[in-house]
Amino acid sequence: MLKRLRESKSAQGTLLITPTLIFMIGLLIIPLLLTLVVSFGQRSADGGVIYTFSLDNYIRLLGYSTDCPNGVSSCFNPLYLQILWRSMALGFNTTVLVILMAYPLAYFIARVKPKWRNTFLFLVLVPMWTNFVIRVYAWMMILRQQGVINSLLGWIAGLFHMPFTPLNMLYTPGAVLVGMVYEFLPFMILPIYTSLEKIENSLYEAAADLGANPFRTFLRITLPLSMPGVVAGTILVFVPVMGTFIVSDLLGGAQVILVGNLIQRQFLDARDPTFGSAASLVLMVLTLIVTYFYTRKFGFGAEIVA
Amino acid sequence: MSEFAVELQDVVKKFITPEGDELAAVNHVSMQIKNGEFFSMLGSSGCGKTTSLRMIAGFEWPSEGEVFIEGKPMGHTPPFQRKVNTVFQNYALFQHMTVYQNVAFGLEMEGAQKAEIEKRVKRALDMVQLTGMERRFPKQLSGGQQQRVALARALVKTPDVLLLDEPLGALDLKLRKEMQLELKSLQQQLGITFIYVTHDQEEALTMSDRIAVMSKGKMMQMGTPVEIYERPHNRFVADFIGESNFLEGKIKSLSKNEAKVFVPDLHVELTGMPIADDLVKGEDVVVSIRPEKIRVAEQSANQNCFEGKVVNTVYIGSDTHVVVDVKGARLKVWEQNRISRLDPKSFYSVGESVHLVLMPENTLVLKKD
Amino acid sequence: MSEFAVELQDVVKKFITPEGDELAAVNHVSMQIKNGEFFSMLGSSGCGKTTSLRMIAGFEWPSEGEVFIEGKPMGHTPPFQRKVNTVFQNYALFQHMTVYQNVAFGLEMEGAQKAEIEKRVKRALDMVQLTGMERRFPKQLSGGQQQRVALARALVKTPDVLLLDEPLGALDLKLRKEMQLELKSLQQQLGITFIYVTHDQEEALTMSDRIAVMSKGKMMQMGTPVEIYERPHNRFVADFIGESNFLEGKIKSLSKNEAKVFVPDLHVELTGMPIADDLVKGEDVVVSIRPEKIRVAEQSANQNCFEGKVVNTVYIGSDTHVVVDVKGARLKVWEQNRISRLDPKSFYSVGESVHLVLMPENTLVLKKD
Amino acid sequence: MNPYRRSPWIIASTILVFIFLYAPIVVLMTFAFNASRVNVLFTGIIPSFGDYQIVNGNVTQSPCGPFHWFCELSKNTAVLNAAKNTMIVAITATVVSTIIGTMAALALQRYNFRLRTFSQISLYIPIVIPEIVMGIIILVLFSQLFTSINNVLNLTGDARLNLGLGTVILSHISFMIPFVTLVVQARLQGLDKSYEEAAMDLGANEWTTFRRVTFPMILPGVLSGALLAFTLSIDDFIITFFTNGPGSTTLPIYVYGLLRRVITPELNALSTIWILIVLIAVFMIQRMENRQV
Amino acid sequence: GGGSSSQQPATKSSASGKVTKDGFNCPEPNPRIPVTSTQLNLFVWTQYIPEDFYECFQLVYGIKVNYDEYSSNEEMDAKLQAGATSYDLVQPTDYTVTLMIHQGLLQPLDHSKLPVLSNFNPAYMNLAFDPGNKYTIPFQNGTDAIVVNTAKVTDLPTSWADLWKPEYKGRMVFADDSRAVIGLTLLTLGYDVNTTDQSQLDQAKQKLAQLIPSIKKFDSDSPSADLIAGDVDLGETWTGEAFLAQAQLGTIKFIYPKEGVILWQDNWAMPKSAPHTDAAYAWLNYTMQGDMFWMMLTSFPYTNPNDAALNYAKGSTMQVTDVNGSSTTLGDVYNAYIDSPITNPPADVIKSGHRIDDVGDATPLYDQIWTEVKGQ
Ligand SMILES: Nc1ncnc2c1ncn2[C@@H]1O[C@H](COP(=O)(O)OP(=O)(O)OP(=O)(O)O)[C@@H](O)[C@H]1O
Ligand SMILES: Nc1ncnc2c1ncn2[C@@H]1O[C@H](COP(=O)(O)OP(=O)(O)OP(=O)(O)O)[C@@H](O)[C@H]1O
Ligand SMILES: [Mg+2]
Ligand SMILES: [Mg+2]
């Protein structure tokens, strides 16, 4: 037996992957198939599922609805597409900002003495080890009308005897962005760091040798070579941002609905698991396709922390 | 324009080693490299070759002394403002760019016109026989091809001076030999100054106009291949460049071009050619004789002739390396295999006794150090 | 115990290349390696040396054929159950272990006693002259030292067979020469079978008892260094091992040990020594002459003698490589620099006319392929 | 080394980003000493020691003085219990998922087998799946499973299989595995196979090879994978909410619920202690590493 | 936890002599109910139960209480519907009760095992969502009304409709609760809060759409925080938050709008799958005894339906800590409760109030409206 195992590499591989597959298939894929079934069903009066095969939920997602004002038989209202669009916009903005902030830091860490790198990486992670809500609350305390920033500004203004009206920062899109960026920064820093850390010095030297000043060296060499890291980070940031909503609810005053809210509400307030399932499946498939495409192209496994 | 393409004046480069103590990687080195010259730096690993090169390129700045390019002192001029280019030991090709883009990079940095760039890149790639590979990425090329790309990338800038750091180190013997010829002919047709770092002495000898032999950050000797090989200034050079038999001795008498040296190992006096000028009578010296320059004679000749026993023969194809025991001293003797025999060892069978002739003009008398 | 330490019987190893097509890295190769023999595999990059070695070590399993160790078929026996050990090209030292731990590792795996381990590790380290380095980590050693550790780590297991994959590839010439001698003497005193992969032919010639020359996964020739060099079976071997002048021609007449070949380039007939047995009259052949075996005569001799002009001379220290033009054909001629002159080039000045003598016994007639 | 590495821009922006990262932490720690119970605004540090006194919502005096909330925390069994659960879940799940994930990484990186691509893709699911969906489907799965098992074995009362820390841990493991795997894979890609071969060549079987050679060499990757997983686990709310059961409340759930009432400074105290512990640990490790080299 | 209240040992005859960490001397249960189970699993609103309830119950009955907490009815319902089977008691709010009954998640209560029922004020019994209290008994209740910071707002709103005034733009906080907000919008239009009439709902949608932009924050967690911090000045909120805010900020006022408030009530209910019904009954009876349930007054400023508790507290001299954590006598707490129009709203407010009820098939309509107005 052992001998046979020994002589078959594929058997060994299979053996090693099995536990993972058990988890993935058992806890995710099978249930996901259930959701697929549910998404074709219809909602019952008390929020149960009537199992049929109807594409209504998907049609509804596209914005075609059968119950319309003033008795029109069917009408088009791209509500959900708008929401999806809004979430993507938020995801996009967040990702861009995160990249802008993460990059220099990652670059810095990649260039300090090796023995210090781990420490810095830790320092990046540590804030994330406080409780999420407490963190967001800290931000609220910073952004409030009578919060840290306004107090500081007020004090400074006081020094110069200037009139000062507190800035209105909390419960604005800006606040949401700040919170999102804060929550996801580390997930961008780590991959970018790894890809930067791989670049040999001789490449920078070669560029300089060929007449590139530091700025152009960055544009033409550093940036392109660290792209895989950026892409990996983008996946680790953009995808979750699409799904989350708690930050936007807490810091944005829950003024808008994002894909996350939408799905959440379907399972809870609206008690329409069928539509919820449809929505989440669509979201997943979209992101899954994008992710897989990216990862195949840039090898993203290779680029998260190392 | 100055007669020297590159000049190092009494340059020192100090590093702090990981252990924290100071190390002079380059220690008061001076050299003048003439325009259009093929200049090689030779030395064992860690002797400061790369560091010297990096100071010329501008990646490092001298701790003391000054580097001149075209007669201008370089000070802290950054690399991208020096008219020298480098071919890196590990090629340092940009993995994310095609061959074409790699070669074009330098020209774009100069802000050359698109058409212009295309023309010059094409020419450069022709020169290194890589036409048709423009679209490939470095990792799709063999070692030799990558090496050529690195070369083209540097050449396309038509630098006054080209620095090459062990460019052939990574290639296998056969390929290395080919590339040596290519490089040499390129250098001759372009008339660019080459500063070439290697630790392969045969390479240096075949290609260079002049060679600088370094050791532990110091310059040991600088000169043409022939000078270096035939007239080494000291034992290190004689030993590092090619092989030598060394016999310790004491100067008995001394004239301008002949020294009589008593060699205790052989209980005889040898006549040889004094190298250093400041040798004095009675001084302890070493006598150096190249193994290929020892004549094997059937019957004894009169002067500088010894009888010995063959103790070992190594067949290396073109030559046979014979080790002869002369009164306990081991002498290496290289004989060319000029006749094809299936057992050239029988040429000299172990134990056979032979006579060795050390001709005075082949016998160098060096300072003992 | 079988007379052969290792035997490959008609072994094939197929790989799926990244492009997805099948590639026979080793293609129907058979070889018998005798006990205590120093056996080298020689061949250009990618010819299947490493793969063959890996099949002996058990990292790869043959697609066809069988590997025998000590006469036992190995089948899918895992590496750790084979009594062979490997010295890896990149040394593959365990970075997280000290020199001592690295060497001790193999013995611990055998479950040897602590004291026993200590004793044997010590002996192994002495053998490779690394005593005192026990506590160091690999990255604190120079290339040559790391190489020795890798060697000690394999030797300490006292394997029947030691596989070495280009162990000296990464070292510089000087160091490589030293290590060659050390390895050779180690092998002789321990009487272990060495299977040695290299692409440096001089290395192979100096060290080996027998050499296998491979090309594109196929075995080209197997034999002693002398056989390989002096009696190459085909043009590839003649060209890959050492250098050769090749002249194309047609067999005019043929006897057991002499062939008359008409060489159009030189408009003459050459007498040479037929190599392959199945040569036939009128067949197209190549005549191969080693550059060191061409005699330069002052005045013309009668047979196989040609007049030519010196077109180029390259000084390489111990020898001078002369290129002579004979009726448009370029012939390489190596002359040993037996006399020390400051300008040995004058030895043969470019343009000077010389007579070349190609002696029949040095002139090999090979199949044209 | 290239002369341009120390660009002032980089350093400046690095400092800024670190300020951004730690500003909330500083605030959070300050509020751990807040006099105000309601903890919405900072009404100053608790001034003096003495018997517990509170004047309209502001603690004016406490046996522990400024450290009032730390003392309160030590009494607050609910929080401590939640914290304990969080740690149990995070640590167990991290350990298990690290082991399984590493195995998977080895398989994907070192072996070829039929399900390879499938496995690789399935590893992305937990990353892209919306948390609530994952939470609910896992809950449905467990309850179906448990009900059937309970019926088959006709277990009753407390003998019945039920939601609890166990289910939480399982679900956490399932979303942590991919992160570990991907990170370790990255590391393995960088690791030359010849080390493992050398070990085998010297007589080590597969397991010994892993234990003595492979593992020590990929350790950094494994660690950072574990860290990432840990980070995700201690903060997870939604999945935990759906998969936990009586008595298995974790900190995020507890704190999240507290949103509905007052988030007393006790929680800031908790975070403060936790952060200090971690920071100290980090620098200890750093010191040790430096001593080694 | 937040609810733990520290007392001197009670000098009551029924004292069991069993004392909690906080030094509260647990009363004897009367009547004591025979129990075989050794555990009790609660699924309750976060921080809605005084620590001493758990401790005392364990002390006097020797039953270990495990509890899980939720912060919205929907979460709780979703979890039970998905098959969480281990809970003995849950705390659904009125409309959720109807729903859970439909979903068949609840089991009828055996009133014979609930002598404690007599403690309750009839005004809070037998409500529309559960006629005859077949499935539930009251726990706490309260109202959704208008909250204002009189220091910042000069002309005070008197009706839901007033909240549409432009001057309040960007200063308001509302519960993030589709039913409540749509409900109050319907009220301004004079419709029923539980209407399922498409056109009425459409009108409500139009009107709500105008309100949304002027709302600064939707918050079902702790709007009081923003009121106290001055980030918002007025809005719609519920009893407890209003009371907390007022306790911190005297200038906070709770205004009952003309159209009528929205009433709500949290109740105890027993899931069908409850594994320890006997323990559950014991818990209900014991914790809602007057000499236990008064604790709600000190830490949970809602309207208390339990007369026995109120009577127990009335005039009591027991030392307790109030909502702000400052210590007073239970009697004073009672007085504060009775005097505060927030915790003790006038009878007509209750009478004119409206209750949110489950709307079954129309639920998605409400959600749709919410999604649309917020998603606009
Ligand atoms: N950045 C540095 N910091 C500290 N020491 C250095 C640094 N760079 C080089 N050295 C030391 O300076 C000495 C010379 O290094 P250098 O690279 O010039 O040698 P080299 O002649 O190029 O050797 P090789 O032939 O192996 O390339 C070596 O001892 C090396 O350890
Ligand atoms: N695992 C593999 N998968 C696919 N092809 C392989 C693999 N290993 C080797 N090859 C191919 O097999 C051929 C022989 O490889 P091998 O390493 O034996 O050559 P080699 O003689 O050792 O060359 P070198 O001198 O460069 O080491 C090469 O073309 C190589 O690309
Ligand atoms: Mg170097
Ligand atoms: Mg190889």
Image: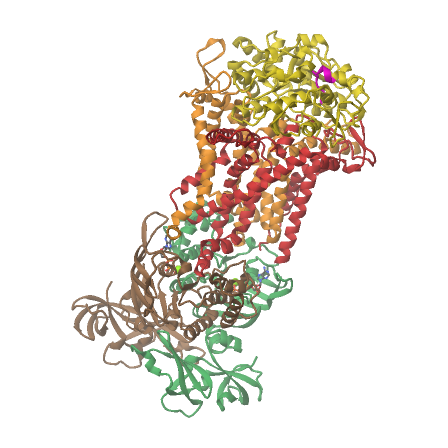
Chain colours: A orange, B green, C brown, D red, E yellow
Pick the front one: C97 or D15: C97
Q: Please give the range of residues in magenta.
A: E300-309
Pick the front one: C287 or B298: B298
In terms of image quarters, where does ligand 2 lie? Answer: bottom left
Q: Is residue B281 left or right of residue E10?
A: left
Q: Is residue E258 left or right of residue B110?
A: right
**Residue C339 visible (yes or no):** no
| Image quarter (top left, top right, bottom left or bottom right) of the N terminus of chain C | bottom left
The image quarter in which residue C84 lies:
bottom left
**Residue E363 visible (yes or no):** yes
Looking at the image, is E5 positioned above or below residue C115? above
Residue A281 belongs to the span the image colors magenta = no
The image quarter in which residue E51 lies:
top right
Looking at the image, is D185 positioned above or below residue C226? above
Q: Position of residue D29 (x, y in %)?
A: 71, 38
Q: Residue at x 50, y 32 (%)?
A: D129
Residue E303 belongs to the span the image colors magenta = yes
Q: Position of residue B349 (x, y in %)?
A: 35, 83
The image shows a total of numbered marks equal to 0
**Residue furthest out toward the bottom:** B302
| Image quarter (top left, top right, bottom left or bottom right) of the C terminus of chain C | bottom left
Q: Position of residue A23 (x, y in %)?
A: 47, 38
Q: Residue at x 65, y 53 (%)?
A: D287
Pick the front one: C292 or E305: E305
State the predominant SS element of the stretch in magenta.
loop
Q: Is residue E61 left or right of residue E75?
A: right
Q: Position of residue E76 (x, y in %)?
A: 58, 24
Q: Residue at x 18, y 66 (%)?
A: C283
The image quarter in which residue E256 lies:
top right
Q: Residue at x 64, y 38 (%)?
A: D84
Pick the front one: A97 or D46: D46
